[in-house]
């Protein structure tokens, strides 16, 4: 699943975090590899690969595992997606 995401992609959160509710739209900002030292409310080793994300509406930033995110790639602007599908 790690190839499914890129920095700047939008995603929905699957799980509740202390600061970001499940079902919230977030933007992926930085990749986290398994075993990396993760900053948050303290520091811990990432048990799985994931991403630092930011919720634009609140400005809150936190970390999520890959399997806790649903990709929204291509859904940022549906009109733009349609325009690309129609040959010029």
Image (cartoon, grey):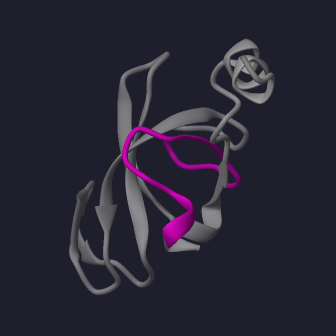
The relative height of residue 2 versus residue 62 in the rendered view (above or below) is below
Residue 10, horizontal then vertical, whole percent:
55, 37
Along the line of sight, the residue nearer the viewer: 9 or 59:
9
Judge whether residue 49 is colored magenta: no
Q: Which picture quadrant has residue 54? A: top left
Q: Which picture quadrant has residue 73? A: top right
Q: Residue visible at 35% across and 84% down?
A: 34
Q: Is residue 1 left or right of residue 2?
A: right
Q: Is residue 30 left or right of residue 13?
A: left
Q: Residue furthest front?
A: 88
Residue 77, horizontal then vertical, whole percent:
66, 18
Picture quarter with the C terminus: top right
| Number of numbered discs overlaid on the protein picture | 0
Along the line of sight, the residue nearer the viewer: 88 or 40:
88
Task: Please provide the residue range marked out in magenta.
Answer: 3-19
Instruction: Give the overall secondary structure of the magenta segment.
Output: loop
Judge whether residue 7 is colored magenta: yes
The relative height of residue 33 versus residue 83 in the rendered view (above or below) is below
Q: Residue visible at 42% across and 76% down?
A: 49
Q: Residue visible at 50% across and 72% down?
A: 2
Along the line of sight, the residue nearer the viewer: 85 or 79:
85
Q: Is residue 86 left or right of residue 70?
A: right
Q: Which picture quadrant has residue 66? A: bottom right
The relative height of residue 1 versus residue 62 in the rendered view (above or below) is below
């Amino acid at each position: 699943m790690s190839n499914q995401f890129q920095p700047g992609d939008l995603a929905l959160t699957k799980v509740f975090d202390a600061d970001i509710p499940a079902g919230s739209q977030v933007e992926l900002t930085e990749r986290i590899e398994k075993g990396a030292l993760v900053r948050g409310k303290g520091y811990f080793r990432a048990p799985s690969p994931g991403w630092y994300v930011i919720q634009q509406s609140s400005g809150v930033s936190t970390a999520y595992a890959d399997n806790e995110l649903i990709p929204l790639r291509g859904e940022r602007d549906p009109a733009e997606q349609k325009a690309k599908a129609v040959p010029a």
